[in-house]
Image: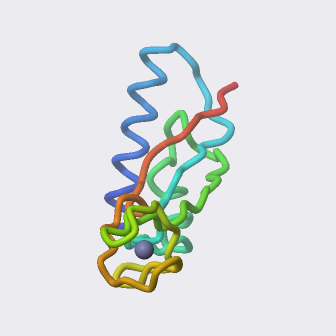
């Protein structure tokens, strides 16, 4: 389950931050996740609890901000929102859309105690 190793990474980043900024407990972790990151949210939430156990992020709430899939249309040069990779441009119908966003997986902010 690769969600667990992702969560272990997230938790270790949080632990580093805790040392750097000297906080002892995390209340909320906000993550930005794009639909193209290939994350199963349910598995992620479950894994996070497992990975956070015994550390500063134990019992923290994981909030997921779902990011849109953004592409740049080569034909009409517009930045457009599409549902998934290989979708046509909603403005001109061209399939030459270069995906520029939607693969995010990052910690946006931490609410600490
Ligand atoms: Zn277009």
Quarter of the image for the C terminus: give it: top right
Tell me which image quadrant ligand 1 sits in. bottom left
**Above-or-below relation of 1 to 103:** below
Q: What percent of the width, then of the height, locates residue 101?
A: 41, 59
Q: What percent of the width, then of the height, locates residue 82?
A: 49, 75
**Above-or-below relation of 78 to 113:** below
Q: What percent of the width, then of the height, locates residue 93?
A: 44, 86
Nearer to me, 62 or 52: 62
Residue at 37% x, 69% y: name it: 73
Residue at 31% x, 68% y: name it: 74
**Above-or-below relation of 6 to 106:** below
Residue at 55% x, 56% y: name it: 49
Colour setting: rainbow
Q: Is residue 92 left or right of residue 97?
A: right
Quarter of the image for the N terminus: give it: bottom left
Nearer to me, 89 or 36: 89
Nearer to me, 60 or 29: 29
**Above-or-below relation of 63 to 18:** below
Residue at 61% x, 56% y: name it: 65
Q: Is residue 42 left or right of residue 36?
A: right
Q: What percent of the width, then of the height, locates residue 66?
A: 58, 62
Nearer to me, 29 or 38: 38
Picture mark count = 0
Locate residue 87: give its quadrant.
bottom left
């Amino acid at each position: 389950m690769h969600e667990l190793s992702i969560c272990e990474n997230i938790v270790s980043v949080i632990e580093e931050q805790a040392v750097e900024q000297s906080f002892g407990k995390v209340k909320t972790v906000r993550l930005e996740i794009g639909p193209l990151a290939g994350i199963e949210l349910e598995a992620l939430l479950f894994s996070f609890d497992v990975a956070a156990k015994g550390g500063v992020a134990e019992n923290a709430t994981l909030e997921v901000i779902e990011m849109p899939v953004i592409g740049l249309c080569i034909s009409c040069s517009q930045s457009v929102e599409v549902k998934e990779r290989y979708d046509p441009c909603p403005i001109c119908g061209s399939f030459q859309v270069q995906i520029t966003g939607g693969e995010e997986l990052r910690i946006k902010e931490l609410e600490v105690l």
